[in-house]
Amino acid sequence: MSPIMTCTSPKGTLRNPVPTEPHRMTQEPTSLLPVWARAPTRRPKTTRRHPLHLHEAAMEEEGADHRPPSSSSGGRGFLSGLCAAALRRKPISAHAAHAASGEGLVRQLGVFELVLLGIGASIGAGIFVVTGTVARDAGPGVTISFVLAGAACVLNALCYAELASRFPAVVGGAYLYTYAAFNELTAFLVFTQLMLDYHIGAASIARSLASYFVQFLELIPFLKGHIPTWIGHGEEFFGGVVSVNILAPILLIILTTILCYGVKESSAVNTFMTTLKIVIVIVVVFAGVFEVDVSNWSPFMPNGFKSVVTGATVVFFAYVGFDAVANSAEEAKKPQRDLPIGILGSLLACVLLYVAVCLVITGMVPYTLLGEDAPLAEAFAAKGLKFVTVLISIGAVAGLTTTLLVGLYVQSRLYLGLGRDGLLPSIFAKVHPTRHTPLHSQIWVGCVAAVLAGLFNVHELSHILSVGTLTGYSVVSACVITLRWNDKTTSCRSLGNMSIWQEGVLCLVIIALCGFVAGMCYRFSYAIAFMIIALLIAVAAGFALQFRQVYVDPPGFSCPGVPIVPMVSVFFNMLLFAQLHEEAWYRFVILSLLAVGVYAGYGQYHAVPSSSDHPHPAVAYHGIPSEAP
């Protein structure tokens, strides 16, 4: 097993590079950097190349920019140009340059704010709305649904924590990691799937918040029954095609204004509201414990374990908070240390709160009596605890407010990342010079959510959510594996013309497909033999990843058990993906085709090329960004 020659710094180690001679070739141990993130060098013909597209590889050896097809391919055909563009990957130095040049955001978030950011994004609709919806089918087993979804998210969070520590300088989250590990088109597809989840989720939460706010106002006697339905609950027109809600867009405008004002101010609002709702949830749990009747937990899974698994796919979206933490990388004071703590800490706190609430409300009243709109408040009202329902209404308003606030925050940062990369118009990349917020991106996100929430009953679209979340999490887990691969030849021969890198990607695809097939077999009660065969094939692909690839330890936080933990994460995510409604699968296919069309018509021609203006990408990739005082 002979390592490929790599370009490393003669004065520094791999964990703290000080590249003074970027074009010097050495025989030192292999660099931790992927090949696309190293200084351009000319390699001997006998060495094995990392599987970049041939056109890009030739340009890299000449030290040229990776230009879009429109400027570098001359008379090349459309399809060949599209393929060349789609397979591009971007060094992180180009992203980090924005922060270094003053175009970036300001680092003002500490570890406490990051943890509360993750909790604020998660604890809201999951407790105050979704519990009742899932409990109608899963019964008290809704607790297991939250545990299963939480277990899957713990695996995903470990992968997110490693990549957040490894790419601490800039925003982007799952999109950024995919761009670095795979290619440009896959990153754009991940963005579109995630963004539709966020847009629909924001509009749905805004309508729920408006409804809860009206219920809170109706606690005042002279307002009870006198507030028109079109103000907060929604009034349908044209046979239900349009559902007018005036309060939801107003609330969205207020939150968007806060986010535009500055991250410090919006973080202060989130910290206050999240602390308030955590205290209320804990008080509610302790008050409800004394009203629990254990006979209500029998039968624990009235409709079988399958309904519990299906419920896990529904509540999966309730754990998206750690993605928000990952997207705050450019605003964290000490990102390499604080981001992993924020991701894992917020997730574990959410799991504990969800499980406690589910056990209490299903123990207080029979699951068949739980409402779908306000299950927590109705459970305490049934026990005559009116004073607790007031607390629950306040907690619901606070919880949904922070969930909506953080959701809008994350969306704007994703648009900021794509605007910087040229995959969306450059107006999304503009940062306000004094407020240091992506003003145009934030306003766009708020307007989209306001239109959806004000005119449509997006609650009915809830069954197509979680598609983008599961897709993004699966790709992020795969990114951990691919970025750990050492760029050197192994004693194993590649399969035909397929390189070892391509073989590894094929194994990851096989694991994902096997997870989906196993989930389909379970969902439609096919013969268990098919599920076993899918599992065995996935295990065989896992063995190939384990023993035919060479892995290195990354700088910063390291996900344990690589490649096993990410592989299990991918498999389990796709198993949950198979439990989604058929409409969710149609949404995935249709949106993917639309995204490819948008990329082919706009993205491939406007993507910002990797530039030789940043000759030392290793500094941006491994270096810890300057920390705010």
Image: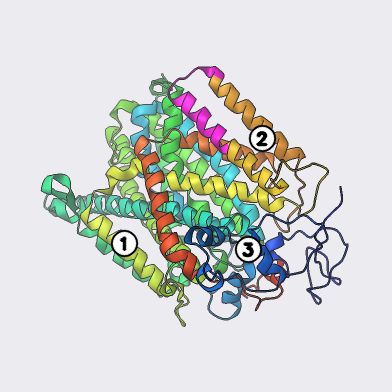
**Residue 108, percent across and down?**
55, 71
Q: Earlier in the sequence, mark 3 or mark 2?
A: 3
Vertically, is 587 above or below 257?
above
Vertically, is 491 above or below 194?
above
Q: Which contiguous range is marked in magenta?
A: 512-529
- Is any part of residue 239 visible from this angle? yes
Which element is circle 2 on? helix
Residue picked out by circle 1 = 448
Indicate the amino acid at tag 2: Ala
The residue at the far front in this view is 75
Distance Cα–Cα, label 2 vs label 1: 42 Å
Distance Cα–Cα, label 3 vs label 1: 39 Å
**Residue 430, percent across and down?**
45, 76
**Residue 481, percent across and down?**
67, 47
Which element is circle 3 on? helix
Indicate the amino acid at tag 1: Val
Label 3 vs label 2, nearer the camera: 3
84 left or right, relative to 251: right
**Is disc 1 surrounded by few (<14), some (14 to 19) or many (20+) residues within 10 Å?**
some
Q: Quadrant of residue 368?
A: top left
Near-viewer residue (201 or 45): 45
Distance Cα–Cα, label 3 vs label 2: 30 Å
Indicate the amino acid at tag 3: His
Residue picked out by circle 2 = 541
Label 2 vs label 1, nearer the camera: 2
**Is disc 2 surrounded by few (<14), some (14 to 19) or many (20+) residues within 10 Å?**
many
Question: CB of mark 3 within 8 Å of CB of mark 1?
Answer: no
Q: Residue at x 58, y 27 (%)?
A: 534
374 left or right, relative to 564: left
Residue picked out by circle 3 = 55
**Residue 158, percent across and down?**
62, 47
